[in-house]
Amino acid sequence: MSPRDIVLLVFGILAGACIGSFTNVVIHRLPRPLDEPNEFGDFWETNPWRTVLGGDSACAECGRKLTALDLIPVLSWLALRGRCRDCGSRIPAYHPFVELLVPALGVLAWWQVGWGWRLPLLWLLIPAGVAIAVIDLHTFIVPTRIVWPTFFVTVAAAVVVALVIGEPRYLLNGLFGILCLAGPLFVIWFVLPRGMGFGDVRLVTLLGWCVGFSSGRSYGNAASLSFLTLGAAAVLGLIIGIGALGARGRNAKVPFGPSLLLAGWTVMLMAPRITEALT
């Protein structure tokens, strides 16, 4: 590893930790509990972005505004031993986990694909995917306010990448990925609307675009990676579901969003090796 790569790596880790800290803000502020379920049976909605992004960070219990020293990723949580400086209420353990996970996934993506054309979409999906997964685990909703903006940003990024590398055909593979990945889940939702939320269908539209684009030139590879994502997500969901049943009993609910995100991002990460094995 060259000195330039080491400097970029250190800078990337620090930047990733800061992005992880902002991801925590989104996770904390975006969901809003409801007094009674809405027309879709959900007990949560999402706040508008002006509410999420406005105001200073503060303790959820006592309302004390956090200082700059309280906002240092990971280190502040460790120094405070996971508690508010004033009231002593617990700061959720997912805070340092997210602040470590975001840069770790960013480094892993760079380590696997280098500075290649697949890297931008992998990086864009990390903070959005982590936020969606944590919110889904807590509230059982897939926030549209994250999914659609991320979708349009990844579309714009893919267009720029395709033009830079001279491969506009990759964009058609993104559309084909949406068809192969979102199509089956839309059918399942249409037939069994109580068995799957429409938020998962929106999520796989985003994942289908990213997985399809990452497949390269072949429509066959786009289809194969999309179906592999579905299969891997189903297996992950089954494993997590069995674990939840053992830990929480037969009435345990398990969101499907985290399994879809993990499967889709991993398939994108391994796409070069998978497509090479298919050819």
Image: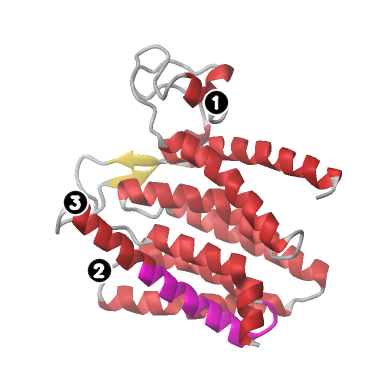
Looking at the image, is mark 2 or mark 3 nearer the viewer? 3
**Left/right of residue 223 with respect to residue 241 in the rendered view:** right
The picture quadrant where one finds residue 100 is top right
Q: Position of residue 77 (x, y in %)?
A: 48, 25
Which mark identifies residue 248? 3
- 124, 276: nearer the viewer: 276
Q: Which residue is mark 2?
A: 195
Q: Mark 3 or mark 1: which comes first in sequence?
A: 1
Q: Check if residue 234 falls in the magenta segment.
A: yes
Residue depicted at 21% across the width and 51% down the height:
247
Q: Residue furthest right?
A: 3
Q: Quadrant of residue 246?
A: bottom left
Q: Which residue is mark 1?
A: 75
Q: Give the residues in magenta.
A: 216-235
Query: In this image, 234 relative to 209: left or right?
Result: left
Up the image or down, 194 lies above or below 183; here it is above
Furthest-top residue in view? Answer: 86
Outermost front residue: 1
Report, in whole angstroms, how far the alpha carbon at label 3 lies from the one at label 1.
33 Å
Viewer-side residue, 129 vs 40: 129
The image quadrant where one finds the C terminus is bottom right
Sort mark 1 into few (<14), some (14-19) or many (20+) by Cα contacts within 10 Å. Answer: few
Question: Which residue is rendered at x = 69% and y = 65% of the image?
Answer: 118
Q: Is residue 199 rendered to the left or right of residue 26? A: left
Let me know if residue 56 appears in the view: no
> Which is in the foreground here, disc 1 or disc 2?
1
Q: Contact, CB < 8 Å: mark 1 with mark 2?
A: no
